[in-house]
Image (tube, helix red, strand yellow):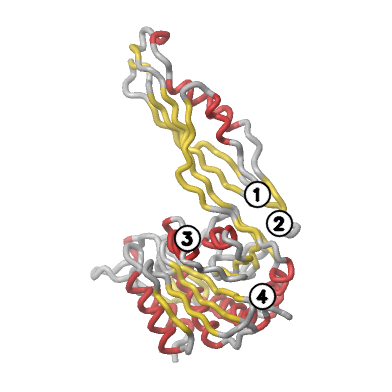
Amino acid sequence: MATLTSLTRDLVSIPSHDDEAAAGKSIRQWLETNTDARVTRDDHGNVIARKGQGDTSLALVGHHDVVPPDGSQVDTDGEYVVEERDGRLYGRGTADMKGCVAAAMLAFRDADPASELVFASFVGEEQGGVGCQAAIEDGFAPDYAVVGEGSTGYSGDGVTDVAVAHKGRRGSTIVAEGAAAHASEPEAGANAIYRATDAVDMVRDLDFPETTVLGHDLRGSVAVTEIDGGSAWNVIPEHCEATVDERTVPGERAPLDRVEAIDGVTWRVDQDLPPMACSDAEFADTVLNAATAAQDGAPEHVVKPHATDAGWLAQAGTDCVIVGAAEPGEAHTADESVSLDVLERCREVYERIAEAWPSH
């Protein structure tokens, strides 16, 4: 029988940055072999399994795609390198987030659920949550979800907390158009860089969006991160663009469209990853109780700065929390790793909440 370490190692060893098919096939086959659940792998590559019955559904959610590996994380045959040392497993996807996918698979297998229990591992999370969005469009709609992204080390070193909210990200572009002219006669043209910088000044003066989720403050941010314009040192620029990174919070957005009041300026949204906020305090407390029972530390409700698939689920009506083994700064690195003890802790949390919720 597979252990959590061996199952994680197996999943991490499967390359899934360009194509998630092999990893999805492996997850589906394991669930079909080791559970009596109803298992599907949809046309998008998402793996979804269901067991138990009831009026309420709880999903254990993860993703099996990863970002491209560092050269040190791939061997000469193109396979992912997985190493175990000092109680940690090293390799691309260990922390983000095949370790917690494996933990959720074992919890799903072993739990005697209080209602319908769903396991879901999505594709395309690293591409903006395209797999999760596709599943929602196809009717995926659990009432509650525990998403296995990182929540360890927020309230204290080594403590696995329960994230009840996270920021979203809206990436957008300010586009300024002008009219070219020779730089010796600037009044003959319309300087697109000046128009863009006027817009940048407006962005700089905007208040950051903020809100409160279950008593916790969540504050967003707005920042201009790139600017590009002009064609030559002696030409008045006719085109200039500025990139804006906005970290959004539930229910609040910065009024970036105000820049369009400037002559020649338009504003374009390029990406909009939604924030997440849990609105069910009882569910959040029940998960916190499960996390407390599974560790010696004292976990807390916390907020995350990063967008996850929980945002898409929350936007569709699912109450979400995040519980996972990854620590801040661990994902996407050349020495990505995960604590095996914390993975075991997460597996226990998932199983406990599956058997405790709904509580009545």
Most extreme residue toward the right is: 215
Q: CA distance from mark 1 to mark 3?
A: 20 Å
Kindly identify the amino acid type of the residue bearing the numbered disc 2. Answer: Val
User: Mark 3 falls on what kind of element?
Assistant: helix
Crowd class of label 4 (few under 14; some 14 to 19; many from 20; radius 10 Å): many
Vertical relation: 43 (above or below) 180: below
Q: Is residue 236 left or right of residue 159?
A: left
311 sits to left or right of 35: right
- The residue at which mark 4 appears reads as 291
Asked whether residue 138 appears in the rendered view, the answer is yes
Mark nearest the camera among 2 and 3 is: 3
Q: Which residue is mark 3?
A: 133
Question: Which of the two labelled residues, at mark 4 and mark 1, occupies the earlier sequence position?
Answer: 1
| Residue at x-position 48% and y-position 41% | 269
Relative image position of residue 309 (x, y in whole percent): 52, 62
Residue 5 % position (x, y): 46, 81
Instruction: Using the image, tell me which numbered label, if any, was put on residue 64.
Output: none
What distance separates the C-alpha of mark 2 from that of mark 3? 24 Å
Q: Which residue is mark 2?
A: 213
In the rendered structure, which amino acid carries the disc numbered 3?
Gln
CB-based contact (under 8 Å), mark 2 and mark 3: no
**Mark 1 lies on residue:** 251
Residue at 44% x, 26% y: name it.
176
Dot 2 or dot 1, earlier in sequence:
2
Contact between labelled residues 2 and 4, with CB atoms less than 8 Å apart: no
SS state under label 1 = loop
Nearer-N-terminus badge (4/3): 3
